[in-house]
Image: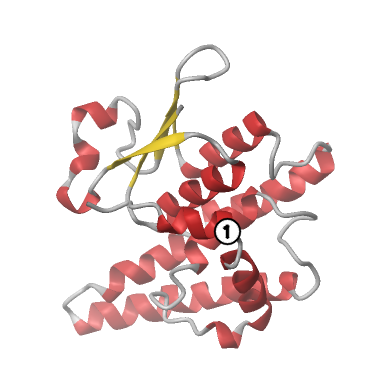
Amino acid sequence: MIHLYAFDTPNGRKISVALEEMGLAYDVTVVDIGQGEQFHEDFLRISPNNKIPAIVDDDGPQGPLSLFESGAILVYLAQKTGRFWPAGLAEQAEVLQWLMFQVGGFGPMPGQVHHFLGLPDEADRRYGLQRFGTETRRLYGVMDRHLGQSRWFARDLSIADFAILGWVWRHARHQVDLADFPAVARWYGELMARPGVQRGFAVPLRR
């Protein structure tokens, strides 16, 4: 059994989708980050950086394994199951480059848009949305150009797609209309139609 500790955020949804797509048995503990539960001592023993998601795998390679950071969790689950993870080194590198694209850019940048949208001061909000909104749209453009030539981010459907999906799911909150990025819209629609993805987004991650 895998124990998922998460909340209803893009990073949490990456893992619920992956677990469903991979057919793994798991349960969920909601960590309400709005109530500060990520700072509770029992959660910090699993995720010392006080961030969700985290997992504990009872059937780890050397006994129970706890793991934090969504990208690391995705790689671990893919390697554990052999699903959505290619066998060849070149193909693995292709998956990892898009996973790192998400972890390092298409996550932090739209996350800043989320932050500045919530500020009460109009001047602060305007500056942040201009800066981070522009960069977020640039990243959508990078994805759109790539997906105009490729069905998935790597050669086949992979954990890179699940990682990026978690954030495209919030495109309206990014103030992005997917009609402006038709290849991303095509990819998003195809993924969201998958039964496993639908189950992953239906997992209750709020109380």
Residue for point 59% across, 87% down: 180
Closer-to-camera residue (18/121): 18
Closer-to-camera residue (23/73): 23
Residue for point 51% across, 51% down: 17
Closer-to-camera residue (151/198): 198
Residue 106 seen from this side: no
Residue 60: x, y in percent? 53, 19
Extreme residue in the top direction: 62
Q: From the viewer's perspective, tell me whether residue 55 is left or right of residue 187.
A: left
Q: From the viewer's perspective, tell me whether residue 59 is left or right of residue 83.
A: left
Residue for point 23% across, 83% down: 123
Colour scheme in use: secondary structure
Extreme residue in the bottom direction: 179
Q: State which quadrant residue 37 falls in.
A: top left
Residue 55: x, y in percent? 42, 33
Under circle 1, the secondary element is helix
Residue 41 seen from this side: yes
Residue 111: x, y in percent? 39, 63
* Mark 1, other Cα within 10 Å: few <14 / some 14–19 / many ≥20: few
Closer-to-camera residue (141/147): 147
Location of mark 1 (residue): 195
Q: State which quadrant residue 66 falls in.
A: top left
Identified by mark 1, the residue type is Pro
Residue 7: x, y in percent? 32, 50
Q: From the viewer's perspective, tell me whether residue 114 is left or right of residue 138.
A: left
Query: How many labels were placed on the picture?
Result: 1
Q: From the viewer's perspective, tell me whether residue 98 is left or right of residue 126.
A: right
Residue for point 40% across, 81% down: 130
